[in-house]
Each structure stands twice: as C-alpha cells, then as structure tokens.
Amino acid sequence: MKNKLDWLKNRKVIFISGITLSTLGVTTYLLKDEENRTKTKQLLGKLKPAGSSNLSVEKSELQKAGTPDPMDTEDNKMVSEGSTFSVQYYNKVRNGN
C-alpha cells in the first residue's frame, strides 16, 4: 500500500514538473521576439490595475476589523449574533442535545 502511495506522489510531482517546464518553454519561445514582449507588457499593464483595486478593498476591511466603530450598528449586530451563536452551541453540546 505504501509503495502505491509513493508512486502516486511521484506521479503528481512529475506531472506538475512537466506542466511547469512546458509553460516555461512556451513562454520563453513566445517572448523571444521584441514585438511579442512589447505586446505582453501592454497586456499585463492593462490587467494590473484590476488586481490592485481588490487589494485596497481587502486592506480597508482589515483596518476596519482591527478598529471597530461603536457607531457601526450593522457590524455590532453581526458581532453580537456571532457571540450568541457560540454560547448557544456550547450549551447545546454541554447538555447533550
């Protein structure tokens, strides 16, 4: 049984390595021409702002979580519901229901 698991792990590693090397080879071949490199840079430049806007939203959510606002009723309601759930779950498990 152990030999079969080792064989499967090795097979996955070989497969992933093959995909990685193939991708690297195709990328190298496509980017060897100056024209293709320029087109790729332009395409990546267009895609870059779309991904960076998500990071700013994520960062603001983390900042909000770190400093909760007492006047934010929606957030306070969610926190109180969450704490109530855990207490109810604990009591349910403790009582065996």
Image (cartoon, rainbow, N blue to C red):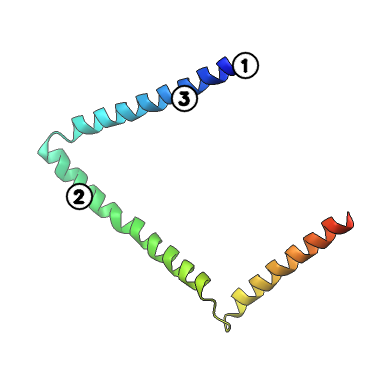
Eye-nearest disc, 1 or 2: 1
User: Mark 1 packing: few (<14 Cα in 10 Å), some, or many (20+)?
Assistant: few
Name the residue that disc number 2 marks.
42
**From mark 1 to mark 2, how far is it between C-alphas?**
51 Å
Q: Which mark is residue 12?
A: 3
Q: Is residue 94 left or right of residue 12?
A: right
Residue type (three-letter) at the residue carrying disc 1: Met
**Mark 1, secondary structure of its residue:** loop
Q: How many marks?
A: 3
User: Mark 3 packing: few (<14 Cα in 10 Å), some, or many (20+)?
Assistant: few
Q: In this rendering, does residue 97 appear at all?
A: no
Outermost residue on the left side: it is 34
Residue type (three-letter) at the residue carrying disc 3: Lys
**From mark 2 to mark 3, how far is it between C-alphas?**
35 Å
Name the residue that disc number 1 marks.
1
Is residue 46 placed above or below 62 in the rendered structure?
Answer: above
Position of the N terminus, as image quadrant, is top right
Can you give x and y, in whole percent of width and height, for residue 51 in the image?
Answer: 35, 56
N-terminal label among 3 and 1: 1
**From mark 3 to mark 1, how far is it between C-alphas?**
17 Å
**Mark 2, secondary structure of its residue:** helix
User: Which residue appears at 51% of the width and 17% of the height?
Assistant: 7
Can you give x and y, in whole percent of width and height, for residue 13 in the image?
Answer: 43, 25
User: Which residue appears at 37% of the width and 26% of the height?
Assistant: 17
Outermost residue on the front side: it is 2
Is residue 15 placed above or below 57 in the rendered structure?
Answer: above
User: Which residue appears at 34% of the width and 59% of the height?
Assistant: 52
